[in-house]
Image (cartoon, rainbow, N blue to C red):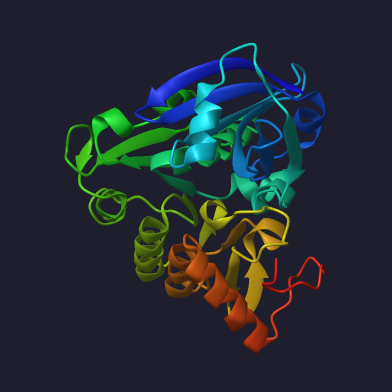
Amino acid sequence: MYRLLEKRLLATNIYYMKVEAPRIARSCLPGQFVIVKTDDKGERIPLTICDYDAQAGTIAIVFQTVGSSTYQMALLEEGNAFQDVVGPLGNPSDMTGEALEDLKKESILFIGGGVGTAPVYPQVKWLCEKGIASDVIIGARSKEQLILVEEMQKVAGNVYIATDDGTAGFHGMVTGRLKQLVQEEGKHYSKAIVIGPMPMMRAACQLTKELGIPTIVSINTIMVDGTGMCGACRVTVGGKVKFACVDGPEFDGHLLDFDEAIRRQGMYKTEEGRARLKELEREQGIQHSCGCGHGGDK
């Protein structure tokens, strides 16, 4: 059992939870995720690790209530426990494997959209602990939907806010704020990491390609099983089949086929769509990179 130590409502239907998980806290790195399960009947839910403290033995997760399983999670109170928390899973952020001297030469921009701000935070914090300041754009529909702004301000070099309705910061999308930073304020970035809703990441990547900024995206939002068994998170990157849960969740945003990923994400929400995806994968002879051999049959 994994005890819930802290619970906070960050915005409407968006929750922060700090969980006691010493083994995971000692092993994880930014970019990785866990699978949580509330009880015997609960669904397995993949969630990116938002923060971790190896010494305290804790990890933090952020989630939005969108279905019955996440609503059940939201009912947990401090002192309650998750039945299972499995991880760390997935590959850590590429930057964790780079030489520190090389990282210090980079000018890194992070863009977090909505709940995608949560997996941005541990990466920015990790860089801060290495003495590297990065810029962050946080986007949301409105001021009320912004999350982790104060936490981000403590670890980032600059934090820029963009809201669709103009109730806070830049009035418009994160892409508009990025264009303003580069074209009007003379900012230069050698790399961008973008995490958020799939359409937002696609729009951001279209812009960063125009601006000549290499871009990494995290596509944890399309994961379902989290172990490479279900096939939900199959994507095409540079013409090659990849699975977000075992090959990612981070990929080159300029090589990712967003149209395919968004189409699959929509289809996987219905039983009919899942059945059709299985048929397509059998026709194409797709097998999972984890070696399970089930293709889309699970």
Vertical arrangement, residue 12 with respect to residue 297, above or below:
above
Q: Residue at x 58, y 36 (%)?
A: 132
Q: How many numbered callouts?
A: 0
Residue 250 placement, left or right of 39: left
Residue sitting at x 80%, y 35%:
27
In the image, what residue occupies the spot 17% across and 38% down?
166
Pick the residue in front: 68 or 228.
68
- Residue 7: % across, % down: 53, 18
Question: Residue 155: in sight, yes or no?
Answer: no
Residue 208 against residue 88 in the figure, above or below: below
Report x, y in % for residue 227. 73, 55
Q: Position of residue 55 (x, y in %)?
A: 77, 18
**Residue in front for this viewpoint, 195 or 212:** 195
Left or right, 252 with respect to 23, comes to left
Residue 163 shows in this picture:
yes
Q: Is residue 40 left or right of residue 160?
A: right
Quarter-wise, where is residue 296 in the image? Answer: bottom right
Residue 35 screen position, x and y as percent: 68, 41
